């Protein structure tokens, strides 16, 4: 972050006649073009002009109200920029040879019109604490637009959590306006007076939080600051009952910008807001606050990644800190892109602390950053529903739905408390509501602070975590389960993927086997389509070991089936060997499971034999599977569900044997049966096989239609495995009838997707197609 000093307003004592002799505009233009840094609207310009006046560091620091160290660092950067501009091979540019170097490279003594036309504007803006303002382009554009006399806005609010940069943004805008007003520029709105009123009680510096001794925290203090800035003592000398009218008359004489910083710490807020609201229309009022006020608000959140990294790099350079790319990323992630936290952290590093220790400290609820940013806001809601909701929100790693937050907070029976509490948290800028998704979001630094608060309230955390697990078990019961019933609802599970994983990991860490087992069995079919396969094998292995340790053989059989499915799909020699071993062991224990589970187990053995190309053995196990289905005496829909795999794998074997007409008939029967129970995934899969048969039989049009329809369904349902297989089939179609280039492109996409899914044999098949002439 950084900004511009008051320049000539603060440097009134500087000898402008010297500056008139310099060709300032061309020098500034050249410096900006070569270094890609801002000079015209930046502190750099003031420092450069001070050098050209021949002033030393102490004089420049005093006149610009800046720390000597800041000025020294800024001047060093300017010397380096001029070396870059002039490409001076013989000199290291410094104050003693600056003029010589510039004249040697063609910068003549001319006239600086911007200085000659300079006029003084009453202003009390503080000196900036930074050297370059970073980011916030859209917010700055909006703010300057609303400050324009053409905009009807009279009062503007900038709100956000502590440390997000509200004051910095408003002061940077005010400095741009001051510069435009003093130098008669068209870069920003012009004012005839700019008044800054701060009610800030605390400042965060790298060593500590210190209490401010001065501040205008009531209406009388605001009147006093206006009187001092406008040099009108009659305001304060008047009786209190007349001061408001005098302020109005005084402000109405010119177009004024009045900034009230930290509205939330003002004692008589209602009275102050009433005063501001009734000011004349020639006065633009900007309010910064941690609490949202419905007065044409501009909401500030964390800096986006690129801006955050730019600020980190800028601060590191100023403090002579070396950070690699990963260090910068870690700092951005831990601070959540909060500008004050970034500046504070690098200030700590420059003081001698290691980056690792600083990053650890940032997450502590008792740390300076957390206390400065959140303590004041949270203090007023402790032991109230908003605080319960804040701590509950922090449990979710991904943005949750309102129903989930209400359940975890234990407030489901009190919807009014939930609505009011979430509204209060939004007013305090602790959370935001995404209107598009309906979810509630918080910054990572806010979440770390709330989690620390949660850890202190152990009883609430224990109860909240139990409610959290229960909510997601109920959620999985609603939207999870077998894909023949729930495939169309899997998008709901995908939206909660991160939160579901967090529940699983937490339950595993706590040793809650039953909850992991129940949740995983509900998510298993969804995981077949969406989840990462390596992670699935880890979970399944843990569940297998735990069920075996407990001699819970019914669950053991159920869990082995999806593990064998994953291993068979991977297709490597080692995976198939492992699948064969566990299936043989589990078949002995099949009687601990019901007949439907036994049929699924037999189907896994069928899949394995097909992979091994043992088609006669596969048919033998298909007969066993079919017998188990008949013995189960299922109702019509369930019977269709468990008989479809028998048809499907019979058709698959016929296809592998090259008996395409027979395979085609069976796959058509599979589609008809699947349509009866709306088993969309199997319909989509059978359609893919029929397209492959059409390609083999030379039916170009039918194959094309089937592939177009099927691919659209696979994409809409985000079925990664089926999507890869449709890409494979389309590659074969293009290779036979279409474009060789398109065929190679599709084959590459399919190969990449197969590799991502761990399906090594399928990936090898695509590599062969790519290698073919």
Image: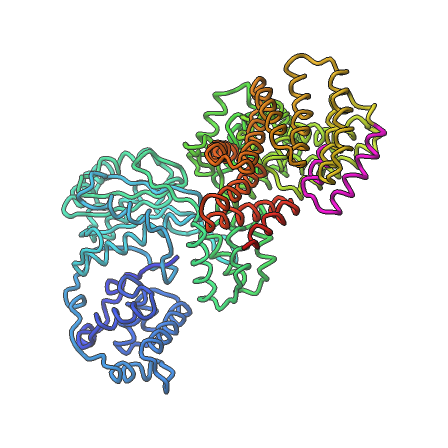
Q: Does residue 319 sit above or below 680 in this rendering? A: below
Which residue is found at the position 61% from the left and 34% from the top? 500
Q: Does residue 4 sit above or below 664 in this rendering? A: below
Horizontal side of 523 relative to 715 (left or right) equals: right
Residue 398 pos. (x, y %): 54, 38
Q: Quadrant of residue 113?
A: bottom left
**Looking at the rendering, in which quadrant would you find the N terminus?**
bottom left
Span shown in magenta: 561-589
Which residue is found at the position 54% from the left and 51% from the top? 334
- Residue 571 included in the magenta stretch of the image: yes
Residue 749 pos. (x, y %): 52, 47
Q: Quadrant of residue 263?
A: top left
Residue 5 pos. (x, y %): 30, 61
| Residue closest to the eye, 91 or 437 | 437
- Residue 112 included in the magenta stretch of the image: no
Residue 53 pos. (x, y %): 25, 76
Horizontal side of 227 relative to 522 (left or right) equals: left
Which residue is found at the position 59% from the left and 40% from the top? 451
| Residue closest to the eye, 202 or 53 | 53
User: Is residue 383 visible from the viewing direction of this image?
Assistant: no
| Residue closest to the eye, 615 or 496 | 615
User: Is residue 704 visible from the viewing direction of this image?
Assistant: yes
Q: Does residue 487 sit above or below 19 in this rendering? A: above
Total numbered labels: 0
- Scheme of colours in the image: rainbow
Horizontal side of 411 relative to 47 (left or right) equals: right
Magenta-highlighted stretch: main secondary structure? helix
Horizontal side of 750 relative to 257 (left or right) equals: right
Which residue of the protein is positioned furthest toward the bottom in this rendering?
90
Which residue is found at the position 79% from the left and 39% from the top? 580
Q: Does residue 697 sit above or below 322 in this rendering? A: above
**Looking at the rendering, in which quadrant would you find the C terminus?**
bottom right
């Amino acid at each position: 972050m950084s900004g511009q000093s008051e320049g000539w307003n603060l440097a009134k004592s500087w000898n402008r006649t010297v500056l008139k002799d310099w060709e300032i505009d061309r020098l500034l233009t050249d410096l900006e073009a070569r270094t890609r840094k801002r000079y015209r609207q930046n502190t750099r310009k003031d420092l450069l002009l001070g050098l050209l006046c021949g002033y030393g560091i102490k004089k420049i620091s005093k006149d610009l109200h800046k720390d000597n160290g800041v000025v020294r660092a800024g001047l060093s950067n300017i010397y380096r920029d001029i070396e870059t501009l002039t490409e001076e091979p013989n000199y290291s540019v410094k104050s003693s040879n600056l003029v010589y170097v510039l004249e040697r490279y063609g910068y003549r003594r001319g006239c600086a019109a911007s200085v000659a036309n300079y006029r003084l504007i009453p202003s009390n803006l503080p000196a900036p604490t930074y050297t370059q303002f970073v980011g916030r382009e859209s917010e700055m554009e909006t703010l300057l637009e609303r400050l324009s006399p053409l905009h009807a806005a009279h009062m503007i609010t900038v709100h956000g959590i502590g440390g997000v940069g509200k004051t910095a943004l408003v002061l940077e805008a005010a400095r741009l306006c001051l510069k435009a007003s003093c130098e008669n520029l068209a870069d920003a709105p012009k004012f005839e007076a700019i008044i800054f009123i701060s009610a800030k009680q605390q400042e965060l510096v790298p060593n500590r939080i210190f209490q401010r001794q001065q501040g205008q925290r009531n209406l009388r203090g605001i009147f006093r600051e206006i009187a001092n800035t406008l040099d009108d003592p009659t305001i304060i000398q008047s009786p209190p009952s007349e001061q408001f009218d005098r302020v109005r008359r005084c402000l109405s004489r010119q177009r004024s910008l009045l900034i009230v910083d930290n509205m939330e710490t003002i004692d008589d807020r209602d009275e102050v807001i009433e005063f501001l609201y009734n000011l004349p229309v020639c006065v633009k009022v900007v309010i910064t606050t941690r609490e949202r006020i419905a007065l044409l608000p501009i909401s500030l959140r964390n800096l986006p990644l690129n801006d955050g990294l730019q600020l980190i790099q800028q601060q590191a350079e100023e403090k002579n800190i070396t950070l690699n790319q990963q260090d910068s990323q870690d700092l951005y992630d831990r601070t959540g892109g909060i500008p004050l936290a970034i500046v504070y952290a690098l200030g700590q590093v420059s003081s001698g602390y290691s980056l690792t220790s600083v990053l650890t400290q940032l997450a502590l609820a008792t740390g300076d950053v957390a206390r400065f940013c959140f303590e004041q806001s949270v203090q007023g809601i402790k032991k109230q529903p908003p605080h319960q909701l804040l701590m509950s929100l922090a449990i979710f790693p991904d943005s949750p739905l309102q129903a989930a937050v209400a359940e975890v907070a234990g407030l489901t029976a009190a919807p009014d408390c939930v609505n009011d509490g979430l509204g209060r948290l939004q007013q305090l800028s602790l959370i935001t509501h995404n209107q598009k998704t309906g979810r509630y979001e918080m910054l990572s630094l806010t979440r770390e602070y709330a989690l620390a608060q949660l850890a202190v309230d152990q009883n609430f955390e224990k109860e909240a975590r139990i409610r959290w697990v229960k909510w997601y078990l109920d959620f999985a019961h609603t939207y999870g389960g077998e894909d023949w019933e729930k495939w169309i609802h899997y998008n709901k599970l995908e939206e909660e993927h991160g939160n579901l994983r967090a529940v699983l990991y937490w339950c595993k860490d706590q040793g809650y086997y039953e909850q992991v087992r129940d949740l995983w069995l509900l998510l298993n079919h969804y995981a077949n389509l969406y989840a990462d396969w390596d992670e699935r094998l880890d979970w399944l292995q843990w569940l297998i070991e735990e069920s075996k340790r407990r001699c819970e053989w019914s669950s053991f059989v159920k869990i082995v089936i999806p593990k064998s499915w994953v291993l068979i799909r991977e297709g490597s020699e080692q995976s198939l060997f492992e699948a064969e071993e566990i299936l043989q062991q589990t078949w002995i224990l099949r009687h601990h499971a019901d007949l439907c589970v036994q049929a699924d187990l037999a189907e896994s053995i069928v899949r394995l034999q097909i992979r091994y190309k043992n088609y006669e053995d596969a048919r033998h196990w298909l007969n066993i599977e079919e017998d188990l289905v008949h013995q189960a005496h299922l109702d019509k829909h369930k019977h269709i569900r468990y008989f479809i795999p028998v048809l499907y794998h019979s058709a698959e074997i016929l296809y592998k044997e090259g008996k395409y007409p027979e395979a085609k008939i069976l796959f058509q029967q599979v589609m008809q049966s699947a349509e009866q129970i709306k088993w969309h995934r199997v319909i989509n899969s059978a359609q893919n096989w029929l397209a492959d048969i059409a390609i083999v039989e030379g039916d170009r049009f039918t194959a094309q239609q089937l592939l177009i329809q099927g691919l659209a369904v696979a994409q809409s349902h985000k079925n990664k495995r089926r999507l890869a297989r449709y890409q494979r089939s389309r590659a074969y179609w293009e290779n036979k009838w279409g474009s060789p280039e398109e065929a190679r492109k599709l084959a590459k996409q399919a190969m990449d997707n197969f590799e991502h899914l761990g399906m090594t044999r399928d990936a090898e098949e695509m590599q062969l197609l790519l290698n073919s002439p």
